[in-house]
Image: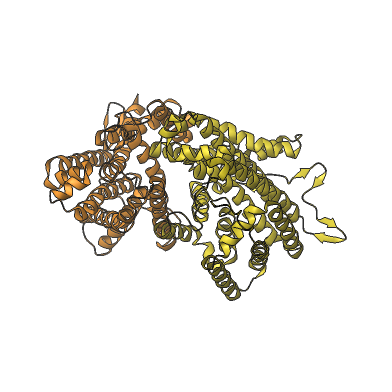
Chain colours: A yellow, B orange
Amino acid sequence: MTGLFPPKPAAVWPLIAAVAFAAAALTTLVLIENQKLLGLTLAGIAAICFAAARFGGVAATEAAASENPWLLRGLITIAAIGVLYVLRDDNFGLLMVATVLIYATVCIGLTIQMGYTGLTNFAAAAFVGTGGYTAAMLGQKGGLPDPLVLIGGGLVAVFIGSLLILPVLRTRGHYAALTTLAFGVMFNVFLDANELLGGPQGLKIPGINLFGWDFSSDLQILGITFSFYVNYVILTGVLTALAMILAGLLDKSWIGVWLDVVRLDETAAAVFGLKIGTWKILAFTLGNFLAGLMGAVYAKMTGFIAPSNFTFGDSLVMVSIVILGGIGNRWGVLPAALIVVLLPEKLQFIQEYRLLLYAILVIVILIMRPDGLVARRVRTLRMEARS
Amino acid sequence: MGMIGQHLLNGMMQGTIYGLVAMGFTIFFGVMNVIKFSHGDVLTLGAFGGLVAVWATNSMGLPVPVQFIAAFAAAMLLSAVAGAGISHFLIMPLRNAPPLNMLLMTMMVGTVLREAIRLFFPNGTNPQRFPELLPSGGFNIGSSFFRTDALILIVAGIASIGVVYWIINRTKFGLAMRAVAEDVETARTMGINFARVIPLTFALGSITAGFAGTIYGLYYSEINYGMGLLLAVIGFTAAIVGGLGNIWGAIIGGYLFAGLQTFVVAAMPSMSDYKNVFAFVLIIMLITWRPTGLLAERGSERV
């Protein structure tokens, strides 16, 4: 980008096309029931994505998106409204969309931890579970308004996570992996043994009621009836958007650069006077808060949680979403979560084999594309920063 | 008083199994600087191989000692092949990748093994009964009862630890292994066949897992597809507490973990469901206190 002439502004039509395509693809995938047709559609979507990547469409979209952030946000909102309108009475489809959004948000938190800061966290499901169980316990006691319950889920996850801060700060590499790994397994053993938390049978939880907005009743807008799951899709969608904006701001600000330095070379970071501990704690806390918050939403949405929802295998699934999407690439999380959550639900023959297939998929990707499907772009510093 | 002997024996048994698993982790880390997290699932695979071997020999009408030998032989062979295969096809191509990728890769390999056993072994979702092949009697010392089979298994386990130690420190293969661990390039210029030493090293580490899996099956009379995961976490923990890459550290770590569990069970019987929780909490505290293990890793960190 050096030179006397300012670069030409990027064309916006690839961005419009990409958002429209994503919305159409999502809706079709959710709606199709016929297995053969679904297979063909998947192949078609894959072919279009591949062609777009091959002929520079992805790069053009990225350029347009980074130059017109507000256009991007507006387009996504319009697309979201469109998708919700088409799916308005498909309960199962809406439930799946909300679940995808929950996974995506947790994985944005995980991206901040693992992708930006380089903190290994193999206990994501445990933090999600902490949020879920907090919501369940607060719900049973009653009296607390639901917004506080959801935030409480996040805060308790942060609190539980803070017990791990000291070991996470003091250890590195494999030793650091151990602390979260042991914590994740420990969490599950604890839930299984604890009678107060329902033991292996789990707990029931009532739905959400935000400021008199009852999530368990159907929504009436302009005379059109929407299934009550639309409430959850809107809530999770807003939370995903907020998490995405937060991760984006982090990435764009100097904090993001510092996190990169901490990840790439702790010694260099310390030499430059960065407080490594502060940034690690910030990233760890943010990620755990998102996990706990979404855990609470998940528990409220499904109405039931049990230890088997939050096993080590689930933590691995979340890590594989981050890896699939390209480590440190926050946009990659969305399609990856979609693939991981939606496909096993739609392709019935996969259901039983899903963990096996994820594992094989991740192995293949780690061998073929060690940076993930859509690799994170190397940071380019702007002119002002360079001079 | 009577319970103390029981707890001691049980703790020794678990400690031997954990020590064997941790030793495998340590061998892989010492030589290749990788954590092969699929270790626990290789152990499960070995145990299931042993079970099939017992079924086969039993249906052929062979005597119990032959079944016993067949179980160990099949378990060790299967885990050795699995270990060597994993190292050759998956770990070697990735050996320059970031440690996180490697850890994740081996976790996923473990998941593949675990899920494959669950899905494709007949009735694999449910626990499998492991036949009793050892004399079931025992004897009393004072008021505590000692199971003969447990004593035999403990002796066998400790003996196998000794054999591995002997292989590493007294044989030519062990020398080659240590040379590769020290410096791959120099070892190669000295004429060590790198491409052969690595799979053999992984086979050796995995054999100890297959051995431990069979001991587990014989002692608890039950195996299931998911047992490797907890054993892997515990073995990994033990190896780390001892200090990665240090065989004695791994064994100390194994017995320490079992000791902590047994202590919780013995001191607070009502909390015995939480024995792993307590053990993990103490281990996390221990690792916070000494971030590179009790017996520190050899060499200093490169800056």
Does A123 sit left or right of B199 as displayed?
right
The residue lying furthest to the front in this view is: A4
Figure quadrant of the N terminus of chain B = top left
In the picture shown, does residue B103 fall above or below A147? below
Work out whether residue A325 can be spotted.
yes
Q: Residue at x 51, y 67 (%)?
A: A54
| Depth check, front residue: A289 or A138 | A289
Q: Residue at x 36, y 28 (%)?
A: B3
Percent across and percent down for residue A86 are: 75, 65
| Residue B29 point in image, percent of width and height | 30, 43
Q: Residue at x 48, y 43 (%)?
A: A122
Q: Number of marks in the image?
A: 0
Left or right? Give the position of B201 relative to A132. left
Rendered image quadrant of residue A72: bottom right
On screen, residue A268 versus residue B173, left or right, reads: right
Q: Quadrant of residue B297?
A: top left
Q: Position of residue B93 (x, y in %)?
A: 32, 56
Q: Residue furthest right?
A: A223
Name the quadrant of the C terminus of chain B. top left
Which residue is more in the foreground, A293 or B303? Answer: B303
| Residue B46 versus residue A19 in the image, above or below | above
Q: Nearer the viewer, residue B37 or A186?
A: B37
Q: Residue B241: where, in percent of width, then height?
A: 35, 32
- Is residue B124 visible in the rendered image? The answer is no
Q: Height in image: B132 above or below B182?
A: below
Farthest residue in the top direction?
Answer: B1
